[in-house]
Image (tube, rainbow, N blue to C red):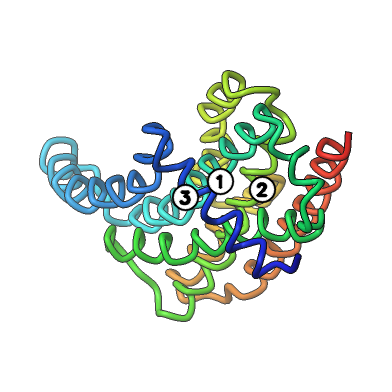
Amino acid sequence: MNLLAASRVLGRIDARNVTRDPLLAWLLPLSLLLAAMFRYGVPPLATWLQENYQVDLVPHYPAIMSFGLLIAPTIVGTVIGFLLLDQRDDRTLEALRITPLTTRGYLGYRVLLPVAISVPITLAVMLIMGLSLPGWDALLVGSVIAAPMAALFALAFACIAENKVQGFALSKASGLVNLPAVVAWFIQSDWQLLFGITPTYWIVKCYWQAMAGEPWLGFALVGLVYQALIGWLLLRWFTRIISR
């Protein structure tokens, strides 16, 4: 069974499982809700800080906006990760072995689905937030290079968590992966590159460079290659799990 056929079959199953689970059903719209909160909450906060503490938040808008690049991949990856845990708990993966669906087709679907979902949602999040935006080329590239993080989150869930209880704990800790990338904004020296150990750094750095009018394509390429390497390792791990 090829990837397109796998998408038709598994897509219906995933959609049904998401709509049946109240937790998963509200997670996907959450990214747009958070974007609206940033759009309408940050400017009044900036005004209040300026008037009361003479703190100018506006120069830090690129750091706040770069966080928007990570919202959708984190949430989409969490949703897909929970679906994978459900399928593993229900032994659905074992049942799929007797169908025409190949392991390669299944893995391809599981990797490409969160990526495909994340790109348009990330674009929508960034446009809704709208605090500071680069040109369309950098915005589109930023959304594309951020999208693979959704697949990495999903695979990490399926590899690390043994059940949904552990999955909940892991979902709370997943935000810590994004935090170092945003903290790096405040390190104005070459030491900032140390944060490159987290793949999310290269995503937000690309955005910061674009907002500053400086070269950003190299950071985008490093981010894609780094995520591809991590994804390859996670896929090997996940393949061993579903082959047991």
As measured in the structure, the alpha-carbon distance from the residue carrying label 3 to the one carrying label 2 is 20 Å
Circle 1 is placed at which residue position?
Answer: 77
Circle 2 is placed at which residue position?
Answer: 152
Tag 1's secondary structure?
helix
Give the answer, above or below, for where 192 lies relative to 221.
Answer: above
Q: Are marks 2 and 1 in contact (CB under 8 Å)?
A: yes
As measured in the structure, the alpha-carbon distance from the residue carrying label 1 to the one carrying label 3 is 15 Å
Q: Are marks 1 and 3 in contact (CB under 8 Å)?
A: no
Sequence-first disc among 3 and 2: 3
Q: Residue at x 57, y 39 (%)?
A: 83
Sequence-first disc among 2 and 1: 1
> Which residue is situated farthest in the top direction here?
165
Q: How far across and down, in percent of the image, does residue 237 sit? A: 84, 40
Q: How far across and down, in percent of the image, does residue 77 sit? A: 56, 46
Of the numbered discs in the image, which one, if any, rests on residue 15? 3
Q: Is residue 1 left or right of residue 40?
A: right
- Type of residue at label 1? Gly
